Image (cartoon, coloured by chain):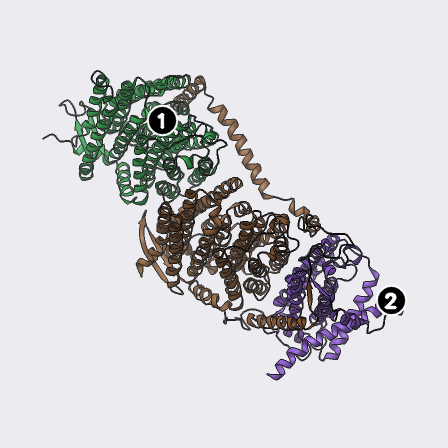
Chain colours: A green, B brown, C purple
Amino acid sequence: MVNLANPILLIVIPLLFVFLIAFSSAFSKSAAKYLPIIAFGINVVVAMLLVPEVLKNGLVLSTTAGFKPPIAIDMIVDKLALFLVIIASVLGFVVSIYNVAYIDEEPEEKFYALFTLLITGIIWMIITGDLFNLFVAFEVTSIAAFGLVGFHRDKGSVEAGFKYLVMGAIGGSLLLVGIIMLYAATGTLNIIDVAQKSAELTFQQKFLAYALIFVGLGIEGALFPLNAWLPDAHPAAPSSVSSILSGIMTTAAIYAIIRITNIIFDYNQIYLFLMFFALLTLIFGEIAAYYQKDIKRMLAYSTIGQTGLFFFAFTIHSTNGLQGAFLQIINHSVSKSMLFLVVGAMIVQVGSRNIEDFVGLGRKMKVSSFFLAIGMFSLMGMPPFFGFWSKLKIIFAALQHSNALMIGSVVIILLMSVVEGAYFFKLLQMMFFGKAEQDREIKEASFGMLVPVVILGFILLFISFYPTPVLDFAHQAASDLMNKNYINLALKLGGL
Amino acid sequence: MNMSLELLLATPFIGGLLTYIGGKVHRWVRNLIAVLFSLATVGEMAMYYNTTFKGVVWGSLFGSNLVLQTNPITWLFLFIVTAISLLVIVFSIDDMKKEEDEIVLDSYYMQLLFVEGAMVGIVLAGDLITFFMFWEIMSWTSYFLIVHGGKKSMAAGYKYIIMSVIGAYAMFIAIAMLYAKTHSLVYSDVALALSQASPSFIIWTVVLLSVGFFVKAAVMPLHTWLPDAHSEAPSPVSPLLSGVLIKMGAYGLFIVFYGLLSVNLAKNIMPSVFSTPILLYIIQWLAALSIVLATFLAIMQEDAKRLLAYSSVSQIGYVVLGLATGTSLGVAGGLFHALNHAIFKGLLFLAVGAVIYRTGTRNMSELGGLVKKMPFTFTALLLGIIALAGVPPLNGFVSKWMIYEALIQKKEVFLLIMAFVGSTGAFLYVYRLIHSLFLGQLPEKYENVKDVPILMQIPIWILALSTIVYGIFPGLAMDVIVKGMKLFGFTPIAYNLFGFPEGTAMGSLTVINIAAVLMTAFVAVFIIFILFPKTRQVSQYDNYASGQELTPDFKYNYSFGFYMSFGRVIKPILSMSIERVYNYWIDAFKIFGDYYMRRIYTGNLETYNSYIVIVVTIAAAAVLLGGKLW
Amino acid sequence: MVSTILIAICVPLLAFAIGLTFIMFKLKITARVQRRYGPPIIQPIYNLLKLLLKEDNISHGVIFSLGPIIALAGSILAVFFIPIPGLNLLTGSGDLIALLYIMAIGSLGMALGAGNTANPNASIGISRALTLMFGYDLPLVIIVISVILQYHTTNLADIVAAQANGHWTLWTLPLSAIVGFVVTYGALGEHPFDIITAPHEVATGPMVEYGGKHLGFLMINHMFHIYIEIALFVDLFLGGASNLFWFYIKMFGVFFIMMLCDEVFLRFKIDDAVRFFWKWPTVVALISLIIVLVK
């Protein structure tokens, strides 16, 4: 009896499918379209099977190649990781469905292979328990993403892909150097082991390594000022890819930063430093989004803003703050992915990414617009949508510390929320209440593109109106991270 | 009984959803569902007359219980919300027929019921999270109602939602501060915590909460969204906005100052002026300024709905002024005026809506002489303006009288002067309204205008009769208000069904006597008038015009720039505009943001890479400096 | 019961009579100041009867006819709220503040009726009337407030009672009394505040379309108006009176001074009138108010 609740399966199965897809064109032209759906369908099932295990033990650990850690590469899924794995798998599954109707450009099977690889890499980054493995996953993800950003092969895509490539490569090498420095200092790559050993090191000894890892991951994680590739890459990529890039890839990089900060660099002063980055990211993201004329660019900048928001929540450095951050991550992932999918469907209909051309779409594409509105409301934090609960949590958590810095930060966050409201409402009212000058032939999005949107929309509505399980789960994940249960449990389960 | 508070809250929301679905079947199904559900809400609300329920827990969030509660004060606001909503929905059935896109109408009714539900939620809330949640829901649902009105309404709605969001976030900070202190946001817990908190903390939270309420209640200088939003919204929505929605701000102020904070506590922690805590005193001044300045602006308007919108700013000033007095009489007056304003402003907006429905314009100088064509609407509007101007024996008078008396008792004479001036000014603009719409010369194109259909008449007349009922029998409202205020620690004021006996205020009032004498005098004079030789009806054009022959194609009676000469007097005041200040800052922000965004996200790879280099360099420098980050 | 009805009938008649005699004297006083002999003292009665008994009365619509009726009804209502010697009437049902608003009913009725014409002069007249009202209202409320504060009551009967034995407000609050005089004078619309009717400019303004019994009723209303304004002034500042005779004498005295003023001044422009009221009378009234507040 094979134990399906094994974290390794989360990576192995999709990787298998990547090869299958790459060779599938030899047998069937259309098989490549549907294989990712099966891959991530299985992934969702595996992730769901992991839920009871993780809830029972707090952590699931599996090792590879028959060695014992720290030599062997291990996969560790605790509540937080599970949380993100579920999101990534579900998004992968849903966006794969979307791709079937959306992608009509050759070479299709290469797209699907890269796409599957992208999400695999993301999941890998999330569950790996080994620093070098983290780097590998990072590179796998990046390479897949470079290819996908340039997929359209027009001038804009290629330029964006190239920028991304250069910056991503710099990021990757900085990450590698940082990991090497940590290895030099501790003599191990296993995260649990590094955590144990680095506890003996001083702040100064670890600082440069940490800074390099931070910069490397920060480039992928869209932290200001390292995020400049993002506003070019997200709009240039096909919408389904933007959806993944925005929804989960930046989040995964931020997750890696959170994890590494938490286990090897858990100093109070560093959080102040990180908060500075978070607020700058938030401010520049939201303000830049306000000026965009290109709808996907606007959403991309909004992603930067949202990243700043949940990264800020992390830097509050309390259980409540972390809970808020996780809630915001869910909110962002589901809503923003949905928005990119909807917008992709609309761009197909309208034939333009210019916001001005979206006038009056609310009357033509009713279902799509409805879900677009829900997603935007949730991102703005309007009740009764999920974003309200997460924003409530973040602000409550921030003001638990009633010092001037926190109050100032909260004021900035809320001001930026107003800016966010300003551009989202501008778009919404144009879509729902504006009247197009000439009557255009615009139909509702095709069924295949609508289904994933509706699935995500219903997930969002479900967690909006029944948030309790998610809130509780996020709280448990947050307190695990705060109490460093990750390390303790992993040690107990033989992670070392 | 516990379940039914939640049911009361759920009814409008369920109704909204069903309305939308019903619209897919047939528009009459939709209309019927909308009316039935709003009627059901009114019915459920009526069950709670003069009852008090403390704390029905309907959920829990972040360790704080979510509570629904009711007491006579909330009942008063529930009454306003549900009754006006019902009338508005009935009025909409005919008024919104002109919208040919059925799906827009489906969502319109849904939004109407959602706004109603959100406001019911605000009023029923027994904790600040519930309150804030429904507050935000109210903001965006009402936003969608405002932008239903066409192109201009989009800009108005945009301004409205942005200002609402800013106000709501000010509130949000205060709520979060309170949460950090108590971890429970149920009103009673918050009140307990505030009673032990430091003065600066109390002042900060109260000020921040008040800012949120001021935006919604359109107290100057945060009123700038209101004139646009209320005038550009569809006719049936304006009464809901002006009559009810801005009252939520007043309700919030009441809860904060008398529910969370008590006047005694306020007096202990801050200095008092005229025996009013300084914070309340400042609020009184803001309210008084709203009264006077908005009155001036209303006098100068040319657009009927804009006139009424500015009048709303002015009238809500009375409500806030009364509420901020802190005495039983003043607060009771403020609460009563909230009810009265909902009635007469609802009436006025509906009546003007009826005129717009028939004529298609709300520009006052294009109208006139409609009294011959729409006598019922005229009569209703006449009652409305009398009530608004605060002339006895209609309802607006009684509540204003209470506010005046309360101010005299406290010797707050300067505020009182401003309140009086606003009331006299109201006389000017309401006359302007009725004159331009109904009196004078009928433009030729409106020869065939009829009075509005019965479904639009009914709401108008219900409100018109209410102005009389609450004017002559103020005791009806006082029953609720006084009983409710007792719960908040106010000494009850003496009242009877017809007015206020000696000792309540510095004088006494029996409105029914005024009404009776007026009616008798009117009948007597009328009879005497009839006894004299008969009158002969002649055409309006058959008049004293220095021998000149009058033709209907020219407008003789003035309706444009009616108070132009008065405008010259108040020109220095009119030229001030807080909105220009806001716009200046917004523009500055836009230019600044645009300038820097272009320089940061240049699209140039070299620049981008240099950012990475800079960050790495800083980190390296920090290492060299011994790991110090600052 | 019978006495109530009797009072209800007699008091308006009394007010009417007082107003009528004032109009009668007015013509005479004006003539004498101008060194003329003047019309017979009974002339206003002839004028009134002529108007009321006219056979052909013209109306421009229902509201046009109702206007004078509402105006007169409003004035009669106001009469009941002003205490006259020996009778406090309805002062218990509505105090000074209520009275200020009751007095507006008359103006509203007149404005409604006059508004329903196609005559620019009527519109201008109403616009001016309301603007002027807004103008004198500011000093008026200030002095009313200072009187209320002085006696700690808003009940007119109590205010009158407090001034017994010669403690008139005129002596205790002279500044308020002066402003009160100016305001009352402005409310009566005599020179220089006769902008509303201004026969040479707007041909009697609101009344321009009225004739016959309608105009007759408006004239009666004007008599009531004179009575109300002056009686209120007397009650507020001259201590009311112990009997009707003194009441009449005091009122006549006030009226007499006003008529003398009437001959001296020219006419204000409407915005100048408002500026005037909002300048000196307001400042003086405020000074008086502050004196009361400090005291």
- For the residue carrying disc 1, how many other residues have a C-alpha within 10 Å: few (<14), some (14-19), or many (20+)? many
Dot 2 falls on a residue whose secondary structure is helix
Extreme-left residue of the structure: A1
On the image, numbered disc 1 is attached to which residue? A239
Q: Nearer the viewer, residue A474 or B179?
A: A474
Q: Which quarter of the rendering shows the C terminus of chain A? A: top left
C91 up-or-down from C198: above or below: below
Labels 2, 1: one chain: no
Q: What amino acid is found at the position of numbered circle 1 in the picture?
A: Ser
Residue C81 seen: no
User: What residue lies at 53% left-to-right and 30% top-to-bottom?
Assistant: B592
Q: Nearer the viewer, residue B576 or A90?
A: A90
Q: Kindly indicate the quadrant of the structure image that contains residue C33.
A: bottom right
Extreme-bottom residue of the structure: C2
Q: Which mark is residue C33?
A: 2
Q: Which chain carries label 2?
A: C
Q: Residue B125: x, y in percent?
A: 38, 54
Q: What amino acid is found at the position of numbered circle 2 in the picture?
A: Val
Residue A220 seen: yes
Q: Kindly indicate the quadrant of the structure image that contains residue C57.
A: bottom right
